[in-house]
Image (cartoon, rainbow, N blue to C red):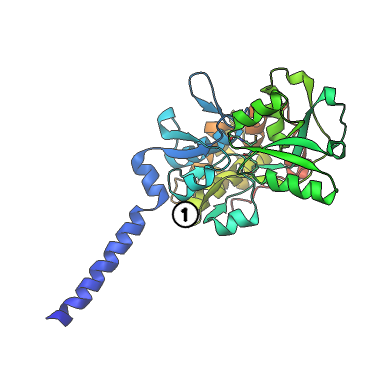
Amino acid sequence: MKNKLLPFLAGAALAAVAATSASAGTLDTIKSKGFVQCGVNTGQPGFGAPDAKGVYSGFDVDYCKAVAAAVFGSVTADNLKFTPLGGTERFPALQSGEIDLLVRNTTWTMSRDTTLGFTFAGVNYYDGEGFMVRKSLKVEHVKDLDGATICVQGGTDTVTGLADYFKKNNLKYTPLVIDKLEDVNAAYDSGRCDALTTDRSGLAGVRLQMSKPDDHMVLPEIISQEPLGPVVRNNDVQWFQIVKWVSNALLDAEYLGITQANVGDMAKSPDSAIQRFMGVGDNDFGKSIGLSKDWAANVIKAVGNYGEVFDRNIGLSSPLKLERGTNAQWNQGGIQYGIPIL
Ligand SMILES: N[C@@H](CCC(=O)N[C@@H](CS)C(=O)NCC(=O)O)C(=O)O
């Protein structure tokens, strides 16, 4: 009797495991709850910050919106929820499942990629660590900061970049490591530090948050490599593929000339690469990642292509006025390169 029951029990147990893992898939969970939970900055202008009504916008926020558009087709405010996260708290928030996706100027490093249970889905901004000082300090280069007190946010690799550079150049410094962005900014603004260090993209926004932005300048040195990008847990390949391919679709669209304004007409394009992108005719690239045929078109309808997302939030016409530079397309002098939908 016992022996006869065993295969049945084993089968039932297997089915239960299969059911659990299927229902535990991030995409299914997101579809059933109806929104993507994104980890974003607490308030980094241009990248992720709430307005007076608590509505989040920015370059990284648009990546979340793009992912939501790929999943839901079109995005309403109900399809997106944001968790503002400081430098230290962002990683446990992703590990615990509190958020589905972290897009918060997070540098892709080997230890984060291999020891935290994460995987990076691309690079949305190639950056490097820089320094801001008061103009009145009359400092022109980082090397002039020998003996300085330097403000830096905790839980960041900026702390390591700072230590490496000062050691390599035989310079002394006192780090003032503070956890919360607003406290870092306030410490520097009130003169507790001679300089503030973070990613150069971050400095552009931080300068604008100072009581007198024009009193400050960013030094010319870039002292580290900071490839920033979206991160997911490494236990769900399908969800990773979705975030990775949304990132590629944003870049591919710019390369192919697909914009938020013209995407509605692109289904008629005779260009085969555009037809694949749009999912017209027999083209169905969405299926392999659990999405609709027109997933990539929906991304562009929601946020525009990479260049549009860049320009609107952080580019030359925005308050941050960041150049495309390294983040231009590979055929425009930069290194941004979308993997083809093919
Ligand atoms: N890219 C670096 C630094 C990222 C970072 O957290 N920078 C601070 C600069 S002040 C920041 O953006 N803080 C925003 C926040 O806490 O909301 C990393 O991944 O560790």
Q: Residue at x 82, y 33 (%)?
A: 219
| 206 w.r.t. 299: above or below | above
The quarter holding residue 154 reads: top right
Counting from the top left corner in percent of width and height, residue 93 is at 48, 44
Q: Residue at x 43, y 43 (%)?
A: 98
Report which residue position mark 1 lands on.
238
**CB of residue at label 1: within 8 Å of ligand 1?**
no
| Residue 312 seen in the current view | no
Counting from the top left corner in percent of width and height, residue 329 is at 73, 42
Counting from the top left corner in percent of width and height, residue 279 is at 51, 45
Q: Residue at x 43, y 47 (%)?
A: 97
Q: Is residue 252 left or right of residue 91?
A: right
| Residue 163 seen in the current view | yes
Q: How many marks?
A: 1
The quarter holding residue 41 reads: top right
Q: Amino acid at mark 1?
A: Gln
Q: Residue furthest left?
A: 1
Q: Quadrant of the N terminus?
A: bottom left
| 259 w.r.t. 277: above or below | above
Q: Quadrant of the C terminus?
A: bottom right
Counting from the top left corner in percent of width and height, residue 85 is at 53, 37
Task: Name the residue nearer the viewer: 230 or 97.
Answer: 97
